[in-house]
Image: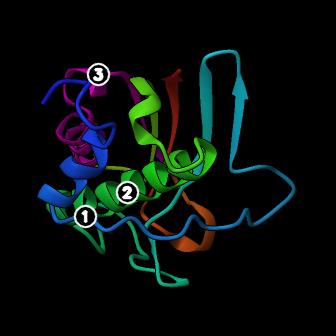
């Protein structure tokens, strides 16, 4: 599909992937979910949250394996896209590029597959936005995350 069809390219792609975006989650503290500066939209860290509760709690290398961590990271990415949709008044076709993802993986000290876990979020961005979804990224292991979730992902998008 090209970018100049009916104006619903990304929405169509989400439907093809079987993804129904949730309502964006309100901030849990003194910050905003998104902040636009120029043509960049910064999205605060999103966790694997569904229907008002955390869908995953635990650590990689203990509670979860890489594949389960990828599912948690994918859910973070879905929540990121929901925040972007809200920030862009519902028009995801205004995304011209995914610039960067930052991923935090709650893991045991001996766990080393953080990049593979974050592929759950990265792969979704490419599946949804095509080549515009290719991005720079960091995947960092941490000793804990809010409410014990295994993954948190933040993002920067280029928008029109």
Q: Which residue is mark 3?
A: 132
Q: Is label 1 in a helix, a strand or a loop? A: loop
Residue drawn at x 24%, y 63% is 71
Residue drawn at x 39%, y 34% is 93
Q: Is residue 10 left or right of residue 78?
A: left
Mark 1 or 2, nearer chain start: 1
Which labelled disc corresponds to residue 95? none
| Number of numbered discs visible in the structure rendering | 3
Residue 59 pos. (x, y %) = 38, 66
Residue drawn at x 38%, y 51% is 77
Which labelled disc corresponds to residue 78? 2
Is disc 1 in contact with disc 3, using a CB cutoff of under 8 Å? no
Q: Main secondary structure of the magenta part?
A: helix
Q: Colour scheme in the image?
A: rainbow
Whole-Å distance between the Cαs marked 2 and 3?
Answer: 16 Å
Mark 1 or 3, nearer chain start: 1
Quadrant of res 100: top left
Q: Which residue is mark 1?
A: 19
Q: Which residues are magenta?
A: 113-142
Within the magenta stretch, is there residue 117? yes
Q: Is residue 54 above or below residue 62?
A: below
Q: Is label 2 in a helix, a strand or a loop? A: helix
Residue drawn at x 73%, y 62% is 27
Residue 6 pos. (x, y %) = 27, 37
Camera-nearest residue between 43 and 89: 89
Whole-Å distance between the Cαs marked 1 and 2?
Answer: 8 Å
């Amino acid at each position: 599909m090209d970018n100049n069809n009916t104006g619903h390219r990304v929405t169509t792609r989400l439907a093809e992937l079987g993804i129904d975006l949730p309502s964006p989650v309100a901030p849990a503290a003194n910050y905003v979910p998104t902040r636009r500066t120029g043509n960049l939209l910064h999205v605060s860290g999103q966790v694997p949250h569904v229907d008002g509760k955390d869908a995953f709690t635990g650590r990689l290398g203990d509670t979860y394996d890489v594949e389960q961590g990828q599912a948690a990271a994918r859910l973070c990415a879905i929540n990121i896209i929901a925040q972007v949709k809200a920030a862009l008044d519902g028009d995801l076709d205004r995304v011209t590029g995914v610039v960067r993802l930052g991923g935090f993986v709650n893991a045991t000290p001996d766990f080393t597959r953080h990049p593979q876990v974050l592929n759950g979020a990265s792969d979704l961005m490419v599946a949804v936005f095509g080549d515009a979804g290719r991005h720079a990224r960091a995947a960092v292991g941490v000793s804990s995350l809010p409410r014990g979730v295994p993954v948190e992902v933040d993002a920067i998008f280029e928008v029109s």
